[in-house]
Image (cartoon, rainbow, N blue to C red):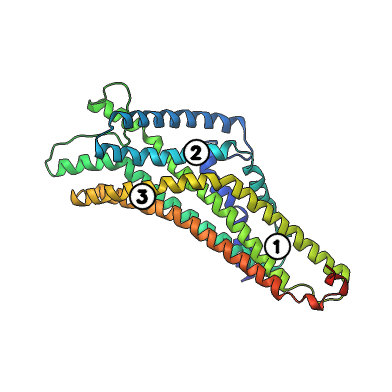
Amino acid sequence: MSIDIDKNFKDAQYLLDQVALPLQLVGVWPDKRTIGSDIRFILFIVYYSTHLFMEYCDLIAVWGDLQAMVTNLIETNLESMIIVRLLSLRFRKIFIPIITSIKQNVVDKNYTDPKEREIYVKYSTLAANYHKNSMRLCSIAALSWYIMPLQRYIWAWINNSPMVLVTPYRIRTGFNISSLNRIIFIYIYQMPMIYPPLCYVATFGFVIVAVTNICGRLAILSYKITNLPAVNKESVLAAALKDHVRKHINIIQMSESIDEAFHLIFLFELISTTALLGLLSYSTMVNWDDAEPMALVTFTTSSFTIIALIYVNCVMGEYLDSECSNLLAAYYECKWYEMPERFDEP
């Protein structure tokens, strides 16, 4: 059992690096920036911003066409949320101390008690499982969205229907792309657009790692305050309480940093995802009536991905609230009356 806990704790130490990997590949991760990461970020953001601009141009051009507007708004809504998150993570300095705090906390010397490691591993495993499954779901949704026009093209060919290949994402290029060769060129040009949604989900993984880190530390504080040294020696008890207070202050500071970093982003995403789910639900019902199985799978998978991202914010909030309540209960149950008299003074 101890060997398994130690192995899982080692995995927990590298969890943040695993979550950061998709963001490092495009130079978005703010920690340990290099010239190479800066170049990758510039190339990525120029490509992505240009593509998003062309999508907004298409939105203006198709204004009044309900179906075209719905499809465009699904894409521009999601991609606007993505660019806001990625730019915030890249340029806001407040994320650096959050990352540093997580890395400095998850070291062997801070978790010498096997029970403390077990508590932390429980939350770390939760974060790892969510990140792994959400990345898989997002990969399926992003890939199926990209190949959806090709699926429709093949489906029409199988049913001897008129075959028209369209681009995966609605954009306005400024030149005629009605020929098949140009459509294929745009199709290839838009292939990198599969990747940004994965980066977006990775930022959720970062938030989950940060929040589960706080939850684990709160749970350990509850465990420690419940098991304070049963001694009358003031120096031993004073050292234990001093360490406890210091760790509690660090948790509060990290919580405030996360709140400052994300509260406006969460507000923007709450509004955007509400609209996005409505648009995806509408598209799902339309494709259900039109009997387009490929599009139906794509829209359904995308809806589940968005719901999973919303759900995890609610779950993390519940875990935080639960651990705060547990810590409060531990303080309440603390046998302060058995401590030396000096600790009874106000």
Residue 110 is at least partly visible in this image: yes
Along the viewing direction, whichever of 302 and 143 lies nearer the viewer: 302
**Mark toward the start of the polypeptide (1 vs 3):** 1
From the viewer's perspective, is residue 335 above or below residue 73?
Answer: below
Q: What mark, if any, has residue 111 been given in the picture?
A: 1
Which residue lies at the image location 37% right of the left edge and 46% below the top edge? 276
**Mark toward the start of the polypeptide (3 vs 2):** 2
Image quadrant holding the N terminus, namely bottom right
For mark 1, does the 10 Å Cα neighbourhood hold few (<14), some (14 to 19), or many (20 or more) residues? some
SS state under label 3: helix
SS state under label 2: helix
* Residue 302 spot, x, y in % from top left: 35, 49
Q: Amino acid at mark 2?
A: Val
Residue receiving disc 2: 84
For mark 2, does the 10 Å Cα neighbourhood hold few (<14), some (14 to 19), or many (20 or more) residues? some
SS state under label 1: loop
Residue receiving disc 3: 277
